[in-house]
Amino acid sequence: MTDVIIIGAGVSGSAVARELSKYDISTCVLEKCEDVCEGTSKANSAIVHAGFDAEEGSLMAKLNVRGNEMMDQLSKDLDIPFKRNGSMVVCVHKDALDGLKELYDRGVANGVKGLKILSREEALEMEPNLSDNVEGALYAPTGGIICPFELTIAMAENANMNGVEFRFNTEVEDIKKGDDGFWHIRTNNGEYVSRYVVNAAGVYADKIHNMVSADKMHIIERRGDYCLLDKEVGGYVSHTIFPQPTKYGKGVLVTPTVHGNLLVGPTAIDIENKEGTATTAMGLNEVTAKASENVKNLPMRNVITSFAGLRAHLERHEFVIEEVKDAPCFIDVAGIESPGLSASPAIGEMVGNMLKEKMGLKEKADWIGTRKGVIKTEGLSIEERNELIKKNPAYGTIVCRCESVTEGEILDAIHRPLGARSLDGVKRRTRAGMGRCQAGFCSPRTMEILHRELGIPYEKITKSGGNSAIVLERTKGEVSMS
Ligand SMILES: Cc1cc2nc3c(=O)[nH]c(=O)nc-3n(C[C@H](O)[C@H](O)[C@H](O)COP(=O)(O)OP(=O)(O)OC[C@H]3O[C@@H](n4cnc5c(N)ncnc54)[C@H](O)[C@@H]3O)c2cc1C
């Protein structure tokens, strides 16, 4: 019997888990994949939005602005990279300049600080690679960039350090209210019983909601395709460059990433497929065409990979964070499309406060709100590296050449709380495999380490759990020497 079960270990579920880990209750996260951050939280623009887009007075606007405010302290506490690089909404048509003023006014009403409308000259001075057609821009200094993997993993890890359990490869199949008054949650890994349930299942949140409520929910998966460019061109722009928004969202942006790449995307294509994350040639062509309207001569020959993510879009385009009316003690965290990443700390805070009040929760005296991330040797001075290697020679062996990731970092990623068990698990914690060769060089070496450290047979090592094994069997079997 658990006090609270959270369904989904994306950025929303992990934020709620960290918040609940402050209280003296039992909390367990059920996740169908083999690691945290396997859903939408792994494939997005990684922007901490300033908060001028969302409709005034909406929950989206409120939680976006609050989440943005919380990010400085949170990134320090959890030792994750976050940079306020500032964002610009670029206007390339004179007759659309009024739209910038509307966004400015909405931003001010939402409580966004420091907004400024820039002239063409001011915009070009700040970003020389903007289109020659630029007429002006809205500048938001509080916009930022973050690593979505590190944010999600760090919040989950910190929750786990404070006693929250995580059950991976555990898919919720059905939920019923038992005669005992508690929620009975059937999974592919046995039954769980809980007083409260938090539904943070991303694009599956409608499926989970519909298991307990007669008031049905429908999520439309809105796919966004991206191109990721090499670090060589990571400085092509220094701010996040947005077009003017449309009813489909914030449009195709061009942004540096917090790790120094350049990211271009996303599209916004409605599909009815919860697993439809394959990119299409049409989508990627659209990314280039639309981004080129605002940024000139984009170096698209430096693309190192493409990917797509799915927004959990609800018709009413609003976060739904509430107790389900006909299912008491069941809390939806649904419709968490953009700006869900930015808002995540505030989503955690909101659900934490709701449950604190409902359940009369008491704070633990021994809660620890900080954690140390995997040491990244790439950012260290030669003296610091030598010191580290003296203590642990594994920090002297480079495994991923593109991103300069050492064996010591991979060992740390594997052996820390909620440690990595797959190639993607290692990649998201250390960046091994994120670089120009996209894991061509380091995969076999990372597999050797996973095999050695965790005793996983080679044939069972996966890219990201499930059926994603890398090798099938030995090609030569046992070789006889006689
Ligand atoms: C193209 C795109 C761009 C975006 N850009 C930004 C941005 O720049 N800034 C920003 O703030 N936001 C952005 N977002 C939004 C942001 O990524 C999401 O709001 C956020 O990641 C949602 O997190 P989540 O935890 O709610 O969902 P998810 O990350 O999808 O997590 C849900 C989890 O639930 C699990 N699950 C599902 N069903 C079950 C089940 N039956 N049993 C157990 N587990 C289950 C899934 O495996 C998954 O791990 C973007 C989104 C997209 C798609």
Image (cartoon, helix red, strand yellow):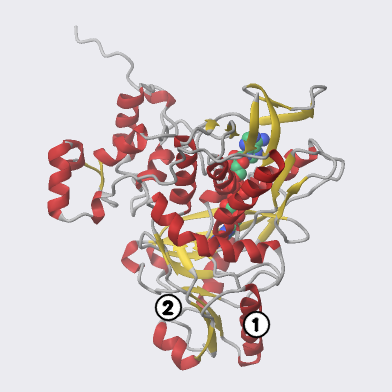
Q: Which residue, given by chain and number where applicable, does mark 2 sit on? A: 297
Residue 461, placed above or below residue 275: above
The residue sitting at 67% across, 47% down in the picture is: 203
Residue 61, placed above or below residue 347: below
The residue sitting at 65% across, 31% down in the picture is: 3
Of badges 1 and 2, the one in the foreground is 1
Residue 70 location (% of width, % of height):
51, 60
The residue sitting at 55% across, 60% down in the picture is: 67
Residue 8, placed above or below residue 264: above
Residue 200 location (% of width, % of height):
65, 44
Q: Amino acid at mark 1?
A: Asp
Q: Which mark is residue 127?
A: none
Q: Amino acid at mark 2?
A: Asn
Q: Hey, which quadrant is residue 422 in on the image?
A: top left
Give the structural element (helix, strand or loop) at label 1. helix
Q: Hey, which quadrant is residue 327 in on the image?
A: top right
First reached walking from the N terminus: tag 1 or tag 2: 1
Residue 336, placed above or below residue 201: below
Q: Which residue, given by chain and number where applicable, does mark 1 sit on? A: 105
